[in-house]
Amino acid sequence: TWGGFYVVGAYKMSDSAESPTETQKEEIHPPPDDSATNDDKKKIDVLLKAVGDTPIMKTKKWAVDKGRTVQSLAQFISRFLKLDATEQLFIYVNQSFAPSPDQEVGVLFDCFGSDGKLVLHYCKSQAWG
Amino acid sequence: MSCGVLDEEEFSRCCQLLLHHSDSVGDGWSWEAVQSSDEGYLKKTVLRSVPADQSITQKHKESGSDSEQFDYCRFKTEEQGVNGSADSLRPDVEDEDDCVCRAPGGSSCSSVLQFEYHVLYSCSYRTPVLYFRASTLEGRSLTLEDVWNSVHPNYRLGLQSRPLDAITQQEHPFLGQAFFFLHPCRTEEFMKPLLQMTWDQNRPVNYVLSWLSVVGPMVGLDVSLDYVTLQQPTV
């Protein structure tokens, strides 16, 4: 067995995600940051698509801060899906490429966004056993 | 490509495509042929500066800005050519000050390490495998613990929780020297749904590139977005 690499499951999950509501599109709010500038508040639309046996998120469309990293988003999704610590979550752009966890979603949007949104595929994998 | 694995011919083909792009942007990958045959592996050498006092602490923050997590900087060896834009610098990553090499004896960038990454084909797993080794510029090989101290903080916890399974020391199949390697036993499993998705969408994919984009960042190997954003011929 292999410990895997995305430590998403091993970290304490972020508490910054808001509880989902019934609206079409949700926002992912970072914790209060008094150094936020106008740029930090810009959000991009992200459409999350499940791959393989990964559970499908009830809410697929999210407005995400441009500066949010892939790692941060992966943690959010893991928490949303209630993945346990033995499950790792991967995120892909262009359906085939895993961006660096430190990559900002805003950059991904600039590179891969179309029709005003960034499509990201996510996939969980059993890391243990 | 099917069922999450690939045969050696496909591996070679994928590597050549990756090399084609690497050559065009000076990303530093090379192909090491084995005994003048078609067999071989990809190789890349990178210099990284690691703070000597970098401890194994969780540096993750939950805010949107994660740039403060990067407190080491990287730069390329001379052999790879000088093409600053080829490095996969991300605008958020480093505080610019940290990218400037401080004078020897400076408090932050106190050790420069050379990392060598090799991508080989595993006949038994039918997947690529990532071998790597690291040494100081004086030639001292890094221990496994040293390697872990230089792994990005985001990955350390996960890797160290299953140390025997994730990174182990292994004899390089061609060089006969001690390398570290990322165990390939999970590769098929995470590649399979990815490949299935691309097949369903009739979308061409470079297995080696996709795989490398997943495993590379774990051990400090950047795979630039431009491998995907610049149009590439496909397998």
Image (cartoon, coloured by chain):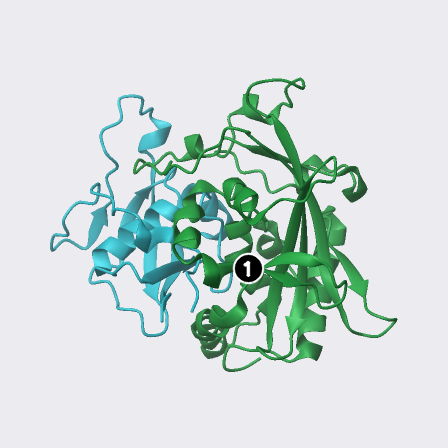
Q: Quickly name the residue at label 1.
A: B168
State the residue at coordinates (22%, 29%): A32
Chain rendered cyan: A
Q: Is residue B132 left or right of residue B91?
A: right
Which quadrant is home to the C terminus of chain A?
bottom left
> For this rendering, which residue is in front, B177 or B31?
B177
* Image location (x, y in percent) of residue A40: 35, 30
Which of the 4 image quadrants contains residue B117? bottom right
- Residue A94 in sight here: no
Chain rendered green: B
State the residue at coordinates (71%, 72%): B13
The kind of residue tagged 1 is Thr
Q: Is residue B17 above or below residue B141?
A: below
* Image location (x, y in percent) of residue B144: 56, 49
User: How many residues crowd around disc 1 within 10 Å: few (fewer than 14), some, or many (20 or more)?
Assistant: some
Q: Is residue A85 left or right of residue B201?
A: left
* Image location (x, y in percent) of residue B181: 59, 60
